[in-house]
Amino acid sequence: MRYRIIHTLLFITISFGAYSQQKVTLSGTITIKTSTETINGASIFIPEAKVSTITNAYGFYSITLPKGDYTIVISCIGFDNIREHISLTENTRKDFSMLEKSKTLDEVVIKYNNSASNIQKPEMSVNKLSIATIKKMPAVMGEVDILKAILQLPGVSNAQEGSTGFNVRGGSVDGNLILLDEAVVYNTSHLFGFFSVFNADVIKDLKLYKGGIPANFGGRTSSVLDIYQKEGNNKEYHITGGIGAVSSRLLAEGPIVKDKSSFVVAGRASYAHLFMKLADNANAVSFYDLNAKLNYKINNNNRLFLSGYFGMDKMDFSNFFKNNYSNSFFNLRWNHIFSDKFFSNASVIYSKYDYGLKIKFAGLDWESDIRNYNLKYNFNHHLSDKLVLNYGVNSIYYQFNPGTIKPMDATSPVNASQIEKKYAWENALYISAEQKLTDKLSLNYGLRYSHFQRLGAQNVNNYAKNQAVSFNPELQIYEEGTPASITHYKKNEKIIDFGNLEPRLAVSYAINDDQSIKASYNRMSQYIHLISNTASVSPLDIWAPSDQYLKPEILDQVALGYFRNFRNGKYSLETEAFYKKIKNKADYIDGAELIAHKAIEQVLLNGEARAYGLEVMLKKNTGKLTGWLSYTLSKAEQRTPGRTAEEPGINNGEWYRANYDKTHNLSLTAAYQLTKKWSFGGIFTYQTGKAATYPIGKYQYQGITIANYGERNINSLPAYHHLDVSATYIPKPDSKKKWKGEWVFSIYNVYNRSNAASMMFEQNRETGLSEAKKVSIFGIIPGVTYNFKF
């Protein structure tokens, strides 16, 4: 029945486009002239027909018109416009190369949906950031950072200073689908979240979807961050790099066979741990990463790409613990153009995330990892100038290692053991259509069917009443359940499966060329979960698949927005209101222990979550001074009621603040070009303090003072705010020499704000009174970096 629905949708949408066969099609690829790097999001506009389109993620475009003479106008931020007359008498393949703009004082630096076509496009809750924009933002320790840029957008926040990842519209970190060249990245942070794993030198472009998520994306319930790496210059060799106080980086790119194949390789490494040793500091933190990509143009219709990434963090707090984690992936992609209207992309991907923790006082050496083998096959079908189809399949095979436990040395009390590995298979079939019904009304609608299977080999616990968590009515607390029996499943034998239909709909109504109203709805399913009850500097990362106890999360989200451009796009305004609700949100019982737990279902209950809010973004897009002001007013809550009338649930079954709830989130981002030599940037951020649970009393037990905690997350940490600034100096901006250099001076946290990462409660040894201490990680941090290119 589900597949029949999808087939029906395909038939209906194809029938809408049948008339396009009476017309001719202009198609091709748009690239950068100096490197032949493809351009994503370039706008192609035909004034005579008043029709437009944009290039896809691989630079391909297709537009269908009646036979005749036309003017084609191609534009993209950071490039000189192309204007050319063309006579169309038959289907025509025509590629274009765009020339990058030279820097001037009036350069357009930040420019989002400021054309009439984008105002009318049925795309909302999406933020696009160009690398040109990101590189104008203040550089932390002299290095620009993609995640820092994302955190300045409305609806996006971090849990706290020193935390990893980011939160979108009140969603959890594991609800973000983060893709680098289509491969899943499970941890986005280096050095306590101070740097991201994304080296800006090698990044081509990115999109953040907060809602209205297209049907080709799935598997998460919060957002999609879609990032692509550069393909490499296939005309000339270039070296780009930077030398900073904490880390340095180097990128090399060039042709393998000129105009046919190219490579790009980039690496970064930190060396702060070396200075710590010189200062006789036994603690050490460091990271390194490596990006690489090769591409080969077989012919005009076929192109191959091979890309990869590897990055690792190492933290050694000499008297307490060691923590290592790493991301890695490889992706082999094939782009194929079937015809002037039909484009495909096939990818075979391997991705892995490792996490290791050594706790010295416990003598524990613990490792976990998640691996996936991913196959994607996607098709773009341009049926007419008013209808474009996107459809395909996606299949992912997962391997989960919840924990390999070893003793650290011969004196350790820990016995070596292996928590049973878990296996799963997630498949999806999707189709979506972008359709322009009238000059004012446009739709994007689609359907995704996802199917998830837990597979053996594994021994699965069975519990009385199918409840892995038991309730003690005398103590009024939840406790770990005791298995009643165990069922053994053979290799690849189905343990349990889930299937979900995920409809998507977005609509745009253009009031005029500069104003529109948009609305969207999407349902999404999440089958894998990050088991973590902390956002500390060394988070506990265990990924687990859905099963009969840990249910898949199901999201329903609606959004309504108003968008407007002012003064020919010099200023723009975006406002959106959203509401989202999630079923089967996992919650931890009080006192849950996660490290090396062999039956994680015994400390988890299924509840629900909701978030709602208002986002506002006001941008200045042109001139010497550019930037934006973003503000979010929102609420994120969670509830886990009792399973029976006798059970209280978590927090007495009432709604309580989620760990990542931030009522107010304000960000002001500015870039100022003073002269050709000097430019400046600044970011001010203010956020309501994250939710916390403080003790409300204490009691003595066998001579030990024990804190008594009240309702969950009823308290808040102090407000989080800081100011970052940077200055960039280019000694010879008009130099014709191949060597280009610049100095970047930065100050993180200018006024030395001690933002609370957490609060510690202890007894004062002198007075005997209880006291609270704020734990802060970063104070003021100056930095300087020399960047170069030749």
Image (spheres, rainbow, N blue to C red):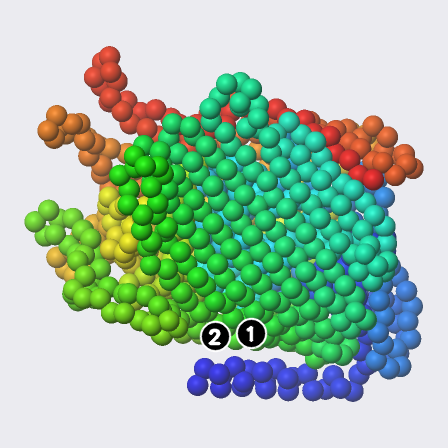
Quadrant for residue 470, please give it: bottom left
Quadrant of residue 359 within the rendered picture: top left
Q: Residue at the location (54% across, 71% down)?
A: 394
Left/right of residue 239 with respect to residue 207 in the rendered view: right
Estimate the x, y position of residue 549 in percent, counting from the top left.
28, 63
Residue farthest along the top direction in this orientation: 766
> Could one spot residue 183 in this view of the protein?
yes
Taking depth in this image into account, of 375 and 647 the one nearest to the observer is 375
Secondary structure beneath dot 1 equals: strand
To which residue does mark 1 refer?
Answer: 393
Of labels 2 and 1, the one closer to you: 1
Residue drawn at (50%, 67%) of the image: 396
Task: Return the residue found at the far left.
Answer: 474
Tell me the element at label 2. strand
Above or below — where is 388 with respect to 673?
A: below
Query: Toward the viewer: 197 or 175?
Result: 197
Q: Quadrant of the C terminus?
A: top right
Which residue is label 2 attached to?
Answer: 449
Toward the front, the furthest residue is: 410
Earlier along the polypeptide chain: callout 2 or callout 1? 1
* Real-space Cα separation, disc 2 to disc 1, in angstroms: 10 Å
**Residue at position x 83%, y 36% in the image:** 740
Q: Tell me if residue 775 comes above or below residue 197 in the rendering.
A: above
Rate crowding at label 2 as few (under 14), some (14 to 19) or many (20 or more) other CA atoms within 10 Å: many
Q: Amino acid at mark 2?
A: Tyr
Residue 566 location (% of width, % of height) = 70, 50
Q: Amino acid at mark 1?
A: Val
- For residue 532, the mark is none
